[in-house]
Image (spheres, rainbow, N blue to C red):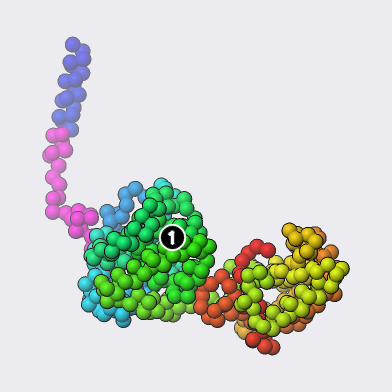
Amino acid sequence: MKINKLINYIFLFTLSLFTLSCAKKDDLDKDIVGLGGEKWVKNEIDQYIYQQFTKPYNIDVLYRWNASEVSFVNNLVPPKEDKVIPVMEMIMKGWIEPYVEIAGEDFIKKFAPRQYLLVGSPEYNSSGTITLGTAEAGAKIVLYRVNWFDVKDRALVQAMLKTIHHEFAHILHQTVMYPKEFEAITAADYTSTWNQVNVADARKAGFISSYAMSGPDEDFVEIASIMLTQGYEPFEEIIKSITDPQGVEKIRQKQQVVLNYFRQTWNIDLYALQQKTEAAINKLSPPPSAFEQLGFERSSSVLFTSNTTDIPNWSPLFKETFEKASASLGTYGNVGRYLEDVNVIYYNKNNMMLRLKYKNPNSPTSIYNADFKFNYVENANTKKTTFAFVGTSTDLNSTAGGNANAVLPYLREMINYFDGKTFHFSWSNDGIYPTPYAKMRRDDNPENYMYGLLKNSY
Protein backbone atom coordinates (compact mmCIF):
# COMPACT_ATOMS: atom_id res chain seq x y z
CA MET A 1 0.00 0.00 0.00
CA LYS A 2 2.83 2.39 0.84
CA ILE A 3 4.53 1.47 -2.43
CA ASN A 4 1.42 2.37 -4.45
CA LYS A 5 1.24 5.77 -2.73
CA LEU A 6 4.90 6.41 -3.54
CA ILE A 7 4.33 5.60 -7.21
CA ASN A 8 1.33 7.93 -7.28
CA TYR A 9 3.40 10.76 -5.79
CA ILE A 10 6.15 10.22 -8.39
CA PHE A 11 3.59 10.18 -11.20
CA LEU A 12 1.92 13.41 -10.00
CA PHE A 13 5.33 15.15 -9.61
CA THR A 14 6.42 14.13 -13.09
CA LEU A 15 3.07 15.22 -14.56
CA SER A 16 3.40 18.64 -12.94
CA LEU A 17 6.89 19.10 -14.41
CA PHE A 18 5.59 18.14 -17.85
CA THR A 19 2.73 20.62 -17.52
CA LEU A 20 5.10 23.43 -16.52
CA SER A 21 7.43 22.69 -19.43
CA CYS A 22 4.53 22.70 -21.91
CA ALA A 23 3.33 26.02 -20.53
CA LYS A 24 6.59 27.71 -21.65
CA LYS A 25 6.40 29.23 -25.14
CA ASP A 26 9.42 28.51 -27.41
CA ASP A 27 10.51 30.68 -30.35
CA LEU A 28 10.08 28.15 -33.16
CA ASP A 29 11.25 30.65 -35.79
CA LYS A 30 14.79 30.85 -34.39
CA ASP A 31 17.61 29.61 -36.68
CA ILE A 32 19.09 26.27 -35.61
CA VAL A 33 22.91 26.12 -35.67
CA GLY A 34 24.13 23.72 -38.32
CA LEU A 35 20.84 23.77 -40.27
CA GLY A 36 21.26 26.97 -42.18
CA GLY A 37 21.59 29.38 -39.26
CA GLU A 38 25.33 30.00 -39.73
CA LYS A 39 26.30 33.09 -41.72
CA TRP A 40 29.68 34.57 -42.55
CA VAL A 41 31.07 37.31 -44.72
CA LYS A 42 33.14 36.12 -47.65
CA ASN A 43 36.79 36.86 -47.10
CA GLU A 44 39.98 36.84 -49.18
CA ILE A 45 40.17 33.05 -49.03
CA ASP A 46 36.61 32.65 -50.36
CA GLN A 47 37.30 35.11 -53.18
CA TYR A 48 40.49 33.24 -54.08
CA ILE A 49 38.70 29.87 -54.14
CA TYR A 50 35.90 31.26 -56.28
CA GLN A 51 38.18 32.93 -58.82
CA GLN A 52 40.79 30.18 -59.10
CA PHE A 53 38.77 26.99 -58.63
CA THR A 54 35.00 27.42 -58.59
CA LYS A 55 34.55 29.79 -61.51
CA PRO A 56 36.91 28.10 -64.00
CA TYR A 57 36.62 24.44 -62.91
CA ASN A 58 33.46 24.19 -60.77
CA ILE A 59 35.54 23.02 -57.79
CA ASP A 60 34.51 24.05 -54.29
CA VAL A 61 36.96 24.05 -51.38
CA LEU A 62 35.62 23.40 -47.88
CA TYR A 63 37.91 24.73 -45.19
CA ARG A 64 35.51 26.00 -42.52
CA TRP A 65 35.13 23.26 -39.95
CA ASN A 66 32.09 21.02 -40.20
CA ALA A 67 32.35 17.91 -38.04
CA SER A 68 29.68 16.11 -40.08
CA GLU A 69 32.04 16.09 -43.08
CA VAL A 70 34.77 14.07 -41.38
CA SER A 71 35.25 10.92 -39.33
CA PHE A 72 33.41 10.64 -36.01
CA VAL A 73 35.86 7.95 -34.89
CA ASN A 74 39.21 9.79 -35.09
CA ASN A 75 40.30 13.06 -33.54
CA LEU A 76 40.91 15.59 -36.30
CA VAL A 77 42.03 19.20 -36.31
CA PRO A 78 40.57 22.03 -38.42
CA PRO A 79 42.83 23.65 -41.04
CA LYS A 80 44.54 26.92 -40.21
CA GLU A 81 43.24 29.68 -42.46
CA ASP A 82 46.71 30.93 -43.35
CA LYS A 83 47.50 27.50 -44.84
CA VAL A 84 44.49 27.32 -47.18
CA ILE A 85 45.68 29.53 -50.06
CA PRO A 86 49.28 28.16 -50.07
CA VAL A 87 47.99 24.57 -50.13
CA MET A 88 45.48 25.30 -52.90
CA GLU A 89 48.15 27.19 -54.86
CA MET A 90 50.30 24.05 -54.67
CA ILE A 91 47.38 21.97 -55.96
CA MET A 92 46.82 24.43 -58.81
CA LYS A 93 50.49 24.46 -59.86
CA GLY A 94 51.28 20.81 -59.23
CA TRP A 95 48.07 19.11 -60.37
CA ILE A 96 45.59 21.25 -62.35
CA GLU A 97 47.98 23.22 -64.55
CA PRO A 98 50.06 20.21 -65.69
CA TYR A 99 46.88 18.31 -66.63
CA VAL A 100 45.49 21.38 -68.41
CA GLU A 101 48.71 21.72 -70.44
CA ILE A 102 48.67 18.07 -71.51
CA ALA A 103 44.98 17.15 -71.61
CA GLY A 104 43.21 20.51 -71.84
CA GLU A 105 40.87 22.51 -69.61
CA ASP A 106 37.81 20.46 -70.53
CA PHE A 107 39.45 17.34 -69.12
CA ILE A 108 39.81 18.92 -65.68
CA LYS A 109 36.34 20.47 -65.85
CA LYS A 110 34.85 17.09 -66.64
CA PHE A 111 36.74 14.77 -64.29
CA ALA A 112 37.99 16.89 -61.40
CA PRO A 113 36.26 16.25 -58.07
CA ARG A 114 33.58 18.81 -57.30
CA GLN A 115 34.88 19.42 -53.78
CA TYR A 116 38.10 19.54 -51.80
CA LEU A 117 37.77 19.16 -48.05
CA LEU A 118 40.80 20.39 -46.09
CA VAL A 119 41.72 18.87 -42.71
CA GLY A 120 44.50 20.24 -40.56
CA SER A 121 45.86 16.96 -39.16
CA PRO A 122 46.48 13.44 -40.46
CA GLU A 123 43.90 10.76 -39.68
CA TYR A 124 45.54 8.20 -37.40
CA ASN A 125 44.04 4.73 -37.67
CA SER A 126 43.86 1.94 -35.09
CA SER A 127 45.94 -0.28 -37.40
CA GLY A 128 48.90 2.05 -36.96
CA THR A 129 48.52 3.52 -40.45
CA ILE A 130 47.82 7.14 -41.36
CA THR A 131 45.23 8.31 -43.87
CA LEU A 132 46.61 11.16 -45.99
CA GLY A 133 43.74 11.52 -48.41
CA THR A 134 40.53 9.94 -49.66
CA ALA A 135 38.39 10.20 -52.78
CA GLU A 136 34.65 9.77 -52.34
CA ALA A 137 32.95 8.41 -55.47
CA GLY A 138 34.84 10.87 -57.63
CA ALA A 139 32.94 13.79 -56.09
CA LYS A 140 35.16 14.86 -53.19
CA ILE A 141 38.81 14.62 -52.21
CA VAL A 142 39.68 14.94 -48.53
CA LEU A 143 43.22 16.24 -48.02
CA TYR A 144 44.80 15.88 -44.58
CA ARG A 145 47.93 17.45 -42.97
CA VAL A 146 47.11 20.95 -44.20
CA ASN A 147 48.51 22.51 -41.01
CA TRP A 148 51.87 20.86 -41.69
CA PHE A 149 52.27 22.58 -45.03
CA ASP A 150 55.49 24.46 -45.73
CA VAL A 151 56.39 25.08 -49.36
CA LYS A 152 60.09 24.91 -48.42
CA ASP A 153 59.60 21.32 -47.26
CA ARG A 154 60.03 19.61 -50.60
CA ALA A 155 59.35 16.13 -49.27
CA LEU A 156 56.03 17.28 -47.82
CA VAL A 157 55.08 19.11 -51.04
CA GLN A 158 55.76 15.92 -52.99
CA ALA A 159 53.86 13.81 -50.47
CA MET A 160 50.79 16.05 -50.53
CA LEU A 161 50.77 16.25 -54.32
CA LYS A 162 51.21 12.48 -54.44
CA THR A 163 48.01 12.21 -52.41
CA ILE A 164 46.19 14.43 -54.94
CA HIS A 165 47.52 12.53 -57.97
CA HIS A 166 46.81 9.23 -56.21
CA GLU A 167 43.18 10.13 -55.52
CA PHE A 168 42.65 11.64 -58.97
CA ALA A 169 43.98 8.46 -60.59
CA HIS A 170 41.30 6.62 -58.59
CA ILE A 171 38.68 8.90 -60.12
CA LEU A 172 39.99 8.12 -63.61
CA HIS A 173 39.99 4.34 -63.23
CA GLN A 174 36.58 4.45 -61.54
CA THR A 175 35.36 6.21 -64.69
CA VAL A 176 37.05 3.81 -67.12
CA MET A 177 38.59 0.70 -65.57
CA TYR A 178 42.19 -0.29 -66.32
CA PRO A 179 42.83 -3.66 -68.06
CA LYS A 180 42.50 -6.86 -66.02
CA GLU A 181 46.01 -7.88 -67.05
CA PHE A 182 47.36 -5.41 -64.47
CA GLU A 183 46.00 -7.35 -61.48
CA ALA A 184 47.25 -10.65 -62.89
CA ILE A 185 50.92 -9.59 -62.69
CA THR A 186 51.06 -10.03 -58.88
CA ALA A 187 47.59 -11.45 -58.21
CA ALA A 188 48.68 -13.76 -55.38
CA ASP A 189 50.72 -11.16 -53.48
CA TYR A 190 48.16 -8.55 -52.46
CA THR A 191 47.71 -8.51 -48.70
CA SER A 192 45.71 -6.78 -45.98
CA THR A 193 48.86 -6.67 -43.83
CA TRP A 194 50.75 -4.45 -46.29
CA ASN A 195 51.70 -2.10 -43.44
CA GLN A 196 53.90 -4.86 -42.01
CA VAL A 197 56.01 -5.04 -45.20
CA ASN A 198 58.92 -2.62 -45.56
CA VAL A 199 59.29 -0.81 -48.86
CA ALA A 200 62.45 -2.67 -49.92
CA ASP A 201 60.72 -6.05 -49.58
CA ALA A 202 57.60 -4.72 -51.30
CA ARG A 203 59.70 -3.66 -54.28
CA LYS A 204 61.44 -7.02 -54.42
CA ALA A 205 57.95 -8.55 -54.66
CA GLY A 206 57.02 -6.28 -57.58
CA PHE A 207 55.29 -3.35 -55.87
CA ILE A 208 56.42 0.27 -56.09
CA SER A 209 55.43 0.88 -52.45
CA SER A 210 54.20 -1.06 -49.44
CA TYR A 211 50.73 0.45 -49.78
CA ALA A 212 50.56 -0.81 -53.37
CA MET A 213 50.31 -4.31 -51.90
CA SER A 214 46.91 -3.52 -50.35
CA GLY A 215 45.03 -4.16 -53.60
CA PRO A 216 45.12 -3.78 -57.40
CA ASP A 217 43.46 -0.35 -57.41
CA GLU A 218 45.99 1.06 -54.95
CA ASP A 219 48.80 -0.64 -56.83
CA PHE A 220 47.70 1.01 -60.08
CA VAL A 221 47.40 4.54 -58.70
CA GLU A 222 50.61 4.27 -56.67
CA ILE A 223 52.63 3.75 -59.85
CA ALA A 224 50.97 6.72 -61.55
CA SER A 225 51.24 9.06 -58.56
CA ILE A 226 54.86 8.17 -57.72
CA MET A 227 55.90 8.64 -61.34
CA LEU A 228 54.21 12.04 -61.43
CA THR A 229 55.60 13.38 -58.17
CA GLN A 230 59.11 11.90 -58.08
CA GLY A 231 60.04 12.68 -61.67
CA TYR A 232 61.71 10.59 -64.35
CA GLU A 233 65.27 10.19 -63.04
CA PRO A 234 64.30 9.68 -59.38
CA PHE A 235 61.74 7.05 -60.40
CA GLU A 236 64.45 5.29 -62.41
CA GLU A 237 66.73 5.47 -59.36
CA ILE A 238 64.03 3.64 -57.39
CA ILE A 239 63.99 0.90 -60.01
CA LYS A 240 67.80 0.66 -60.00
CA SER A 241 67.79 0.22 -56.23
CA ILE A 242 65.69 -2.97 -56.40
CA THR A 243 67.91 -6.00 -55.93
CA ASP A 244 65.52 -8.66 -57.24
CA PRO A 245 65.36 -8.78 -61.07
CA GLN A 246 61.90 -10.40 -60.93
CA GLY A 247 60.64 -7.53 -58.80
CA VAL A 248 61.98 -5.07 -61.35
CA GLU A 249 60.32 -6.97 -64.19
CA LYS A 250 56.94 -7.01 -62.46
CA ILE A 251 57.04 -3.28 -61.75
CA ARG A 252 58.07 -2.58 -65.34
CA GLN A 253 55.14 -4.66 -66.60
CA LYS A 254 52.75 -2.72 -64.39
CA GLN A 255 54.27 0.59 -65.42
CA GLN A 256 53.71 -0.27 -69.07
CA VAL A 257 50.05 -1.07 -68.42
CA VAL A 258 49.68 2.31 -66.67
CA LEU A 259 51.39 4.13 -69.55
CA ASN A 260 49.19 2.38 -72.11
CA TYR A 261 46.04 3.09 -70.08
CA PHE A 262 46.68 6.83 -69.88
CA ARG A 263 47.56 7.01 -73.58
CA GLN A 264 44.82 4.79 -74.96
CA THR A 265 42.01 5.77 -72.59
CA TRP A 266 42.67 9.47 -72.01
CA ASN A 267 45.10 10.38 -74.81
CA ILE A 268 47.63 11.43 -72.18
CA ASP A 269 51.36 10.84 -72.57
CA LEU A 270 52.23 10.09 -68.94
CA TYR A 271 55.91 10.89 -69.51
CA ALA A 272 54.96 14.31 -70.89
CA LEU A 273 52.69 14.88 -67.88
CA GLN A 274 55.53 13.73 -65.64
CA GLN A 275 57.80 16.40 -67.13
CA LYS A 276 55.21 19.07 -66.37
CA THR A 277 54.61 17.95 -62.78
CA GLU A 278 58.33 17.60 -62.09
CA ALA A 279 59.00 21.12 -63.41
CA ALA A 280 56.12 22.47 -61.33
CA ILE A 281 57.40 20.84 -58.13
CA ASN A 282 60.92 22.09 -58.80
CA LYS A 283 59.57 25.62 -59.20
CA LEU A 284 57.31 25.39 -56.14
CA SER A 285 59.93 23.87 -53.88
CA PRO A 286 63.41 23.87 -55.44
CA PRO A 287 65.47 20.79 -54.61
CA PRO A 288 68.23 21.25 -52.06
CA SER A 289 71.79 21.34 -53.27
CA ALA A 290 74.15 18.50 -52.40
CA PHE A 291 76.04 21.02 -50.24
CA GLU A 292 72.89 21.58 -48.16
CA GLN A 293 72.37 17.84 -47.70
CA LEU A 294 75.89 16.76 -46.78
CA GLY A 295 77.54 17.92 -43.58
CA PHE A 296 77.47 17.93 -39.81
CA GLU A 297 73.89 17.76 -38.46
CA ARG A 298 72.45 17.69 -41.97
CA SER A 299 70.43 15.02 -43.74
CA SER A 300 73.62 13.08 -44.46
CA SER A 301 76.93 13.27 -42.62
CA VAL A 302 78.93 10.79 -44.73
CA LEU A 303 79.93 10.47 -48.37
CA PHE A 304 81.01 6.88 -48.97
CA THR A 305 82.62 5.42 -52.08
CA SER A 306 84.10 2.00 -52.82
CA ASN A 307 86.30 0.49 -55.51
CA THR A 308 84.03 -2.57 -55.55
CA THR A 309 80.87 -0.67 -56.57
CA ASP A 310 81.53 2.95 -57.53
CA ILE A 311 84.67 2.99 -59.65
CA PRO A 312 82.74 3.35 -62.95
CA ASN A 313 81.38 6.69 -61.65
CA TRP A 314 84.70 8.16 -60.50
CA SER A 315 86.38 10.84 -62.54
CA PRO A 316 89.55 9.56 -64.25
CA LEU A 317 91.65 11.92 -62.09
CA PHE A 318 90.21 10.65 -58.80
CA LYS A 319 90.55 7.07 -60.00
CA GLU A 320 94.21 7.73 -60.79
CA THR A 321 94.78 9.18 -57.31
CA PHE A 322 93.04 6.25 -55.64
CA GLU A 323 94.93 3.64 -57.65
CA LYS A 324 98.31 5.28 -56.99
CA ALA A 325 97.61 5.35 -53.26
CA SER A 326 96.42 1.75 -53.29
CA ALA A 327 99.51 0.60 -55.21
CA SER A 328 101.74 2.46 -52.78
CA LEU A 329 99.95 0.84 -49.84
CA GLY A 330 100.67 -2.54 -51.41
CA THR A 331 104.39 -2.02 -50.80
CA TYR A 332 103.87 -1.64 -47.06
CA GLY A 333 105.28 -4.89 -45.68
CA ASN A 334 105.23 -6.21 -49.26
CA VAL A 335 102.04 -8.17 -48.58
CA GLY A 336 99.81 -6.45 -51.15
CA ARG A 337 97.56 -4.37 -48.91
CA TYR A 338 95.06 -2.39 -50.95
CA LEU A 339 92.51 0.40 -50.53
CA GLU A 340 88.84 -0.50 -50.76
CA ASP A 341 86.61 2.28 -49.36
CA VAL A 342 86.79 6.01 -48.80
CA ASN A 343 84.58 7.75 -46.20
CA VAL A 344 84.32 11.53 -45.90
CA ILE A 345 82.79 11.86 -42.43
CA TYR A 346 81.52 15.17 -41.03
CA TYR A 347 81.60 14.26 -37.35
CA ASN A 348 81.99 17.70 -35.78
CA LYS A 349 81.11 21.27 -36.61
CA ASN A 350 84.60 22.01 -37.93
CA ASN A 351 86.10 18.52 -38.35
CA MET A 352 86.02 15.98 -41.14
CA MET A 353 87.42 12.48 -40.81
CA LEU A 354 88.84 10.92 -43.93
CA ARG A 355 88.48 7.22 -43.18
CA LEU A 356 90.41 5.05 -45.63
CA LYS A 357 89.50 1.38 -45.36
CA TYR A 358 91.97 -1.20 -46.58
CA LYS A 359 92.50 -4.94 -46.67
CA ASN A 360 95.40 -7.33 -46.17
CA PRO A 361 95.31 -10.40 -48.48
CA ASN A 362 96.66 -12.47 -45.60
CA SER A 363 93.43 -11.73 -43.69
CA PRO A 364 90.86 -11.52 -46.50
CA THR A 365 87.83 -11.19 -44.21
CA SER A 366 89.27 -8.32 -42.16
CA ILE A 367 88.83 -4.62 -42.92
CA TYR A 368 91.16 -2.04 -41.38
CA ASN A 369 90.31 1.60 -40.70
CA ALA A 370 92.85 4.38 -41.04
CA ASP A 371 91.48 7.71 -39.81
CA PHE A 372 92.89 11.07 -40.86
CA LYS A 373 91.54 14.24 -39.29
CA PHE A 374 90.87 17.42 -41.27
CA ASN A 375 89.58 20.83 -40.33
CA TYR A 376 87.12 22.35 -42.75
CA VAL A 377 85.65 25.77 -43.49
CA GLU A 378 82.36 26.19 -45.33
CA ASN A 379 81.36 29.18 -47.42
CA ALA A 380 77.55 29.37 -47.31
CA ASN A 381 77.45 31.93 -50.13
CA THR A 382 79.49 29.95 -52.65
CA LYS A 383 78.45 26.59 -51.15
CA LYS A 384 82.05 25.41 -51.14
CA THR A 385 84.16 23.69 -48.49
CA THR A 386 87.91 23.88 -47.92
CA PHE A 387 89.80 21.12 -46.05
CA ALA A 388 93.08 21.23 -44.10
CA PHE A 389 94.91 18.12 -42.88
CA VAL A 390 95.46 17.94 -39.11
CA GLY A 391 96.91 14.46 -38.56
CA THR A 392 96.01 10.90 -37.68
CA SER A 393 93.16 10.45 -35.21
CA THR A 394 91.47 8.10 -32.76
CA ASP A 395 88.40 10.36 -32.40
CA LEU A 396 86.05 7.81 -33.98
CA ASN A 397 87.93 4.56 -33.41
CA SER A 398 90.52 3.59 -30.82
CA THR A 399 92.70 1.61 -33.24
CA ALA A 400 92.15 3.63 -36.43
CA GLY A 401 94.74 6.23 -35.41
CA GLY A 402 97.42 3.59 -34.95
CA ASN A 403 96.63 2.10 -38.35
CA ALA A 404 96.74 5.58 -39.85
CA ASN A 405 100.19 6.26 -38.35
CA ALA A 406 101.50 3.06 -39.93
CA VAL A 407 100.11 3.64 -43.42
CA LEU A 408 100.35 7.45 -43.66
CA PRO A 409 103.61 7.46 -45.67
CA TYR A 410 101.96 5.22 -48.28
CA LEU A 411 98.69 7.15 -48.58
CA ARG A 412 100.00 10.65 -49.18
CA GLU A 413 98.32 10.72 -52.59
CA MET A 414 94.91 10.49 -50.92
CA ILE A 415 95.77 12.95 -48.14
CA ASN A 416 97.03 15.49 -50.66
CA TYR A 417 93.88 15.09 -52.74
CA PHE A 418 91.98 16.84 -49.91
CA ASP A 419 94.60 18.87 -48.02
CA GLY A 420 94.30 22.59 -48.79
CA LYS A 421 91.75 21.93 -51.52
CA THR A 422 88.33 23.50 -51.98
CA PHE A 423 85.39 21.40 -53.15
CA HIS A 424 81.94 22.16 -54.45
CA PHE A 425 79.17 19.61 -54.57
CA SER A 426 76.67 18.34 -57.10
CA TRP A 427 74.21 15.50 -57.38
CA SER A 428 75.42 12.37 -59.11
CA ASN A 429 73.43 13.19 -62.25
CA ASP A 430 74.50 16.85 -62.18
CA GLY A 431 71.35 18.54 -61.00
CA ILE A 432 68.59 15.95 -60.65
CA TYR A 433 67.30 15.37 -57.13
CA PRO A 434 66.45 13.29 -55.18
CA THR A 435 69.21 10.74 -55.50
CA PRO A 436 71.31 9.12 -52.78
CA TYR A 437 74.55 9.82 -54.68
CA ALA A 438 76.62 12.99 -54.94
CA LYS A 439 79.91 14.25 -56.34
CA MET A 440 82.61 16.23 -54.55
CA ARG A 441 84.29 18.32 -57.26
CA ARG A 442 87.70 19.90 -56.86
CA ASP A 443 87.40 23.65 -57.33
CA ASP A 444 90.76 23.80 -59.13
CA ASN A 445 89.43 21.31 -61.71
CA PRO A 446 85.68 20.47 -61.82
CA GLU A 447 86.53 17.37 -63.88
CA ASN A 448 88.35 15.97 -60.87
CA TYR A 449 85.69 14.57 -58.53
CA MET A 450 84.88 11.69 -56.25
CA TYR A 451 81.47 10.07 -56.38
CA GLY A 452 79.69 8.39 -53.51
CA LEU A 453 76.64 7.42 -51.52
CA LEU A 454 75.24 9.87 -48.98
CA LYS A 455 74.45 8.20 -45.66
CA ASN A 456 74.75 8.57 -41.88
CA SER A 457 76.87 5.58 -40.90
CA TYR A 458 80.55 4.80 -41.38
Residue 391 seen in the current view: no
Please provide percent x and percent y for residue 411. 80, 75
Q: Which residues are magenta?
A: 18-44
Q: Amino acid at mark 1?
A: Gly
Q: Is residue 333 left or right of residue 457?
A: right
Please identify the dominant SS of the magenta region.
Answer: loop
Please provide percent x and percent y for residue 103. 28, 78
Q: Quadrant of residue 102?
A: bottom left
Residue furthest toward the bottom? 444
Point 47% across, 50% down: residue: 196
The residue under label 1 is 206
Q: Kindly state the secondary structure of the residue where label 1 is placed.
A: loop
Point 31% across, 55% down: residue: 70
Q: Is residue 135 above or below residue 319?
A: above
Q: Could you tell me which quadrant the C terminus lies in?
A: bottom right
Q: Could you tell me which quadrant the N terminus lies in?
A: top left
